[in-house]
Every structure is written in structure tokens, then in C-alpha cells.
Image (tube, coloured by chain):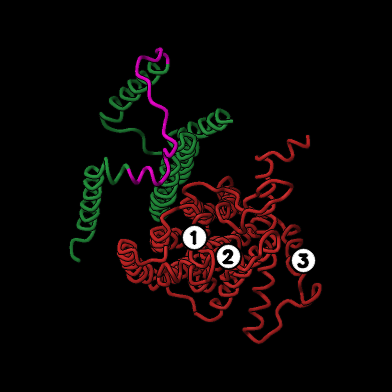
């Protein structure tokens, strides 16, 4: 029994459980952080009644979601209507599997890499999972049998396909510089001082900015939240959803935010590396691991803060502006960035 | 383990393929969704065969992009009911079933006949990785690869020309 519990596949299950728990806790925390930060930005309090500083607000919200009535509209197409939130949630959680959130640590006399899936085409796995993520939204929009939902679903599918191109091209720039599709190796190359990060020594600053903008569109966050623009579409694709089903869309959006932030950190900003050559300074063992994991969390946290900051800074785009930005600006710029990167790599001017 | 995954994937693939063509729901969107599931199952087969890269591309390109576009068009057209449309024309009525039966006969006979002579070498260690595939594409299959790229560009320009006569 003990051997089974410590065998490799079961250990992978532990890692998966750990990641899922951390992600969902992060989501809960993030809903609170977002509302408090919004309060700060708008010069009001935000939720501050439940628990210290309103910290238990997510728990209260969760309990409330569970006790709400779960409505399936009469004219909705029930099988797809029920499937849609699950699809959104599953694909959102899957994408995180390839992201290394810490170094390989040693525990109970075995080496544990802090990444669930270390495969050759790891980055492609993340892209595949996010490209499937659109199904949850599209299915929800169609199965609700409501005009607003359908419009939201249509917008989501067009928007996510458009911005996926720019996103993928920005990622390819990094892949050219690193010469591998394995996230673990991409992170390992960015060790040491912070100028070893891909965004600096790989000359990927432009690619990073493109990735950031496209990431906002991919996660349907303001200023690109056209699929659920409340002033036009009530609530977009999840207008007809209630109770836990709505909550799952909500959580999927936040998980997607965390994943895209983590991807940006992994690809461009050194992953779990702190930006200081701590290993050279003689730091090793568990203090180093803990510092590195905390560095990863801090970097992701910064991007989460950025999400909220941008939300209350930029007004929502018009739909044609969104498409024009995606196809006429970001896409050509991303292509040019890719060409420039290819030249840099051919001339061996990158720090790799 | 591998055979369990294979059996589950096979059942899913065949079932979803049947949902695509059988008049269970009589609904174009359900068919499209089932086709997307089918494509993901095929990607699963690629993973089982150690062809990771092709598997990922299968999901990204077919399930993630092309099927979403098809869904987009279906939703825009808002086709709800296709009850009135049956098979029509000589090809669909007679030639179609004939071809299907012929194909099925080939498959079944191939499965039943004992395996003959040719054996294949074991796949290399690197097989299916992005590196190995890229090496093959840009050395051994360089000219076919470039020819296909050219073909795709021609197809793209053709589509733009057909759709936008007056640019």
C-alpha cells in the first residue's frame, strides 16, 4: 500500500491535486482582490464586511452560488447547455498543466519536478487547451437559445480566433530564441541575472507586449470583453446561466487569467527564477526552492494586478475597433517581430 | 494501460462520428460539436502513436480553429431544422452507399486477413518530437513542403479574390 501511494503515477496525481487546489484558491482570492482594488481605484471601499477586510467574501459568494436556484431555460438545448460550463472549466484547468511553477525539488528521497506535464511540445499543449476553451463559450451562447447569448458566443469565437494568431506568433518568437518547445527548458535558459530573461536578452520586448494584449483578448477581459459587454448584451454568453453553472464560467475566466499570466511569466520573464543569481551566491536546497516558488507567485500576482488596473483604466473597445486592432495592427506587428527575431537568431545576436 | 486508452478513444471516436451523420438530434450544431470531439479523439490516437507534434497541431488547427469557424458560420445562418432535406441526386443516392460498402469491405478484409511479409523498423527514439519532424520537413521533404506552402498561398489568394471582387 505504501509503495503504491509513493509510486510515480500517484505522485503525479498529488501534483495535479495540489495545482488544482492552488489554482482554485487563487481564483477565490483573486475575486476578492479584484473587488477591493476596484474599490481603491474608484475611491470606495469594496467588500469589507465578511471577515477581516472582507477576506471571507469569496466563501460567502460560493455558498450563495450553491443555494441559488439552477435554472435551465425551457427553450434551451439542455445537453449542450449543461456541458458548456464544464467544457469552459476543464479546458481552463488543462492549460496550466505544462507550466513549471517551481524548480525540481527533493522530497522523501525522490526528485519532484514542480510541473505536471513535461512533454516535448509543452507550449503547444497550452495553446491547444486555450484554443479549445472557446468551445465552452460558443456552446453556452448557442444552447441558451437567446439573442444576447448567441451574439456573445459569436463575438467570442471570432475574437478568440483572431487574437490567437497574434498570440501564437508572439510565442513563436520566444521559441525561435530558445530553440525548444519544452517550458521547463525555456525557463532553465533564463537563469541568473534578470537580463537573461527572454524579454531582455532574447530581444522579445515587442513580442511580450503583443502577448500581453492578445492575452487580454483571449481571456475576454476588459478592454476586450466584447462577449459579455453588459451595456450591449446584458451579460453576453452567460446571460441565461444561474447558480453554480454561472459560477463555473466565472471561475474559468479567472483560471484563464492566471494561466495566461503564468504563460507570460514562463515565456518572457524568467519563470520561477528571481532575476538574481541566488544559486551562485551559495543558496541551495529548500530555501532556494521556496524563494523561487514565491518569485513565480509574485510575478503572476503582478500580472493579476495589471489585469485589474487595465480594467479600470481603459474603456471598452468597439467591436470593429477590436477586429481592426487584431488583424491590421497586432498581426502585422507580430509577423514583423517574428521576422526580426529570425534574423537575430540567424546572426547569433541573442543571448542564447 | 495503452490498450485501455485505445479502446476508450476508439469507442468515443466511432460514437462521435456516428452522431455527426446519424439523424439523432437533426441539428447541424450538434453534428459540428460531435465532429470536434471526433477530431480531438483522432489527436488522442496520434499521442498514442508517439506523434505528439501532429497530435497538438490536430487539436490547434482542426478542433481549435477550423471547427470553430464552421460553428461560427452555422450559428450565423441559424439552421435549426433539417428535417426536409434527404439525400438527393444520383451520386448521393446510389454511388455513395456503394462506395461506403466497398470501403468497409476493404477495411474488414484487411483486418481479417493474416498479416503478410513487410515488417517495419522500430521508431527512433526522437520520433514524433518537434525536432525530428522539423529536421525531416526541412531536409528530406524540403521540396514537397515548399510546394504545399505555395499551394496554400494560392488557395488563400484565390479565396480572397472570389470573396472580394472589388477590393
Residue A137 visible in the picture? yes
The picture quadrant where one finds residue A49 is bottom right
Q: Are marks 3 and 1 in contact (CB under 8 Å)?
A: no
Which chain is green in the rendering? B
Residue drawn at 72 percent across, 60 percent down: A65
User: Is A70 on the left-hand or right-hand side of A307?
Assistant: right
Which chain is red in the rendering? A
Residue named by callout 3? A60
**Disc nearest the viewer among 3 and 2:** 2
Local SS, label 2: loop
Which stretch appears magenta? B112-135
Subunit that carries the residue with mark 3: A
Residue named by callout 2? A273
Q: Does residue B98 sit above or below A234 in this rendering?
A: above
Residue drawn at 47 percent across, 61 percent down: A156
Establish whether labels 3 and 1 are both on one chain: yes
Please report whichever mark, 3 or 2, sits nearer to the chain's N-terminal start.
3
Query: Does residue A284 show up magenta in the picture?
Result: no
Quadrant of the image containing the C terminus of chain A: bottom left
Amino acid at each position: 500500500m505504501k509503495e503504491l501511494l509513493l509510486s510515480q503515477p500517484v505522485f503525479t496525481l498529488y501534483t495535479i491535486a495540489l495545482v488544482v487546489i492552488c489554482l482554485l484558491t487563487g481564483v477565490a482570492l483573486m475575486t476578492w482582490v479584484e473587488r477591493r482594488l476596484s474599490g481603491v481605484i474608484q475611491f470606495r471601499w469594496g467588500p469589507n464586511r465578511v471577515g477581516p477586510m472582507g477576506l471571507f467574501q469569496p466563501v460567502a459568494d460560493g455558498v450563495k452560488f450553491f443555494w441559488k436556484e439552477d435554472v435551465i431555460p425551457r427553450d434551451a438545448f439542455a445537453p449542450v447547455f449543461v456541458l458548456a460550463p464544464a467544457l469552459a472549466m476543464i479546458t481552463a484547468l488543462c492549460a496550466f498543466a505544462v507550466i513549471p511553477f517551481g524548480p525540481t525539488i527533493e522530497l522523501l528521497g525522490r526528485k519532484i519536478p514542480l510541473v505536471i506535464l513535461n512533454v516535448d511540445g509543452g507550449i503547444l499543449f497550452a495553446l491547444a487547451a486555450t484554443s479549445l476553451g472557446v468551445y465552452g463559450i460558443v456552446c453556452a451562447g448557442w444552447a441558451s437559445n437567446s439573442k444576447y447569448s448567441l451574439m456573445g458566443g459569436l463575438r467570442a469565437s471570432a475574437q478568440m480566433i483572431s487574437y490567437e494568431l497574434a498570440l501564437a506568433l508572439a510565442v513563436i518568437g520566444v521559441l525561435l530564441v530558445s530553440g525548444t518547445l519544452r517550458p521547463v527548458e525555456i525557463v532553465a535558459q533564463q537563469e541568473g541575472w534578470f537580463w537573461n530573461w527572454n524579454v531582455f536578452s532574447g530581444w522579445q520586448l515587442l513580442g511580450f507586449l503583443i502577448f500581453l494584449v492578445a492575452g487580454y483578448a483571449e481571456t475576454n477581459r476588459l478592454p476586450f470583453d466584447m462577449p459579455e459587454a453588459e451595456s450591449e448584451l446584458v451579460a453576453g454568453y452567460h446571460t441565461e446561466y444561474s447558480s453554480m453553472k454561472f459560477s463555473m464560467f466565472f471561475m474559468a475566466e479567472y483560471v484563464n487569467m492566471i494561466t495566461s499570466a503564468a504563460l507570460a511569466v514562463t515565456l518572457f520573464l524568467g519563470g520561477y527564477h528571481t532575476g538574481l543569481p541566488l544559486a551562485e551566491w551559495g543558496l541551495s536546497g529548500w530555501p532556494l526552492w521556496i524563494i523561487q516558488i514565491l518569485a513565480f507567485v509574485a510575478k503572476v500576482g503582478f500580472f493579476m494586478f495589471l489585469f485589474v488596473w487595465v480594467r479600470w483604466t481603459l474603456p471598452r473597445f468597439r467591436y470593429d475597433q477590436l477586429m481592426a486592432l487584431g488583424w491590421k495592427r497586432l498581426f502585422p506587428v507580430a509577423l514583423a517581430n517574428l521576422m526580426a527575431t529570425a534574423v537575430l537568431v540567424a546572426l547569433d545576436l541573442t543571448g542564447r | 494501460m495503452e490498450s485501455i486508452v485505445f479502446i476508450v478513444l476508439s469507442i468515443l471516436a466511432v460514437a462521435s462520428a456516428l452522431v455527426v451523420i446519424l439523424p439523432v438530434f437533426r441539428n447541424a450544431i450538434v453534428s459540428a460539436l460531435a465532429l470536434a470531439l471526433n477530431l480531438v479523439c483522432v489527436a488522442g490516437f496520434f499521442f498514442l502513436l508517439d506523434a505528439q507534434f501532429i497530435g497538438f497541431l490536430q487539436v490547434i488547427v482542426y478542433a481549435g480553429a477550423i471547427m470553430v469557424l464552421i460553428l461560427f458560420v452555422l450559428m450565423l445562418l441559424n439552421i435549426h431544422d433539417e428535417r426536409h432535406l434527404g439525400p438527393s441526386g444520383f451520386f448521393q443516392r446510389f454511388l455513395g452507399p456503394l462506395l461506403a460498402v466497398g470501403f468497409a469491405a476493404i477495411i474488414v478484409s484487411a483486418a481479417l486477413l493474416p498479416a503478410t511479409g513487410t515488417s517495419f523498423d522500430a521508431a527512433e527514439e526522437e520520433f514524433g518530437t518537434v525536432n525530428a519532424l522539423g529536421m525531416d520537413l526541412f531536409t528530406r521533404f524540403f521540396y514537397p513542403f515548399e510546394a504545399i506552402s505555395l499551394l496554400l498561398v494560392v488557395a488563400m489568394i484565390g479565396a480572397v479574390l472570389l470573396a472580394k471582387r472589388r477590393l
